[in-house]
Amino acid sequence: RWRLKVTADEVDPQFLKMLVAYEDQRLWQHAGIDPWALMRAGWQLVSNGRIVSGASTLSMQVARLIEPRTDRSFSAKFLQAARAVQIERRLNKADILDLYLNLAPYGGNLEGVRAASLAWFGKEPKRLSTAEAALLVSLPQLPERRRPDRFPEAAKAARERVLLRLAVSDVVGDGEAARASLAMVPS
């Protein structure tokens, strides 16, 4: 694995805002589990008969990254939530964010936003453009299927989903999101 240590202070502030807006809007308010996101995901499951969106917080994602499970059951999700609460009791939000920034998968052998930023864009994560930041926000959900070098169209579509999310557009502004949509995806 190629992982290079980084802290939130060494990452573009806009990337961090986009990450929180896309992955965990109530990061600073919850204690590891977001009850509103759980209710929304539960309602969507009941209404649609399938999983439409998840309810994982960044703390839950860190728990999954630290203790990976191949099982995708409700019991595994419950254990992940319990671990997230334990993590929240032991670490502050900045430490949890730093763990995510260092452990998130970005395709191939890349782990962490610094390794991904250097590999995909040839620059430190402190200097990301809006388009680059949006791509890096999107990759950890499906890192192998969205690899820009192998699947540029999937990477671009994932980046667009990030830029179109209302919470993200509030962070970057509609005009900047539109400009970022036109940027090329690295290959």
Image (tube, rainbow, N blue to C red):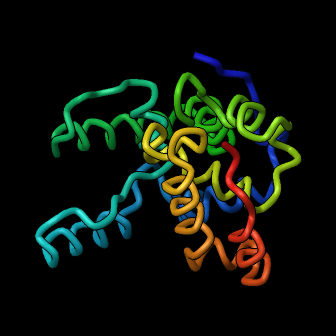
Q: What is the quadrant of residue 109 in the picture?
A: top right
Quadrant, the C terminus: top right
Tell me the residue at 22%/67% (across/down): 42
Can you give x and y, in whole percent of width and height, for residue 52 in the image? 27, 67
Q: What is the quadrant of residue 13 in the picture?
A: bottom right
Can you give x and y, in whole percent of width and height, for residue 108 in the image? 53, 27
Tell me the residue at 72%/78% (across/down): 178
Quadrant, the N terminus: top right
Can you give x and y, in whole percent of width and height, for residue 34 in the image? 41, 60
Can you give x and y, in whole percent of width and height, for residue 5 in the image? 73, 23
Residue occupying the far bottom of the picture? 174
Tell me the residue at 45%/41% (across/down): 61
Image: 115 above or below 161: above
Image: 141 above or below 174: above
The image shows a total of numbered marks equal to 0
Q: Nearer the viewer, residue 178 or 29?
A: 178
Looking at the image, residue 138 sits to the left or right of residue 38; the answer is right
Q: Nearer the viewer, residue 119 or 54?
A: 119
Tell me the residue at 75%/63% (across/down): 183
Q: Nearer the viewer, residue 15 or 55?
A: 15
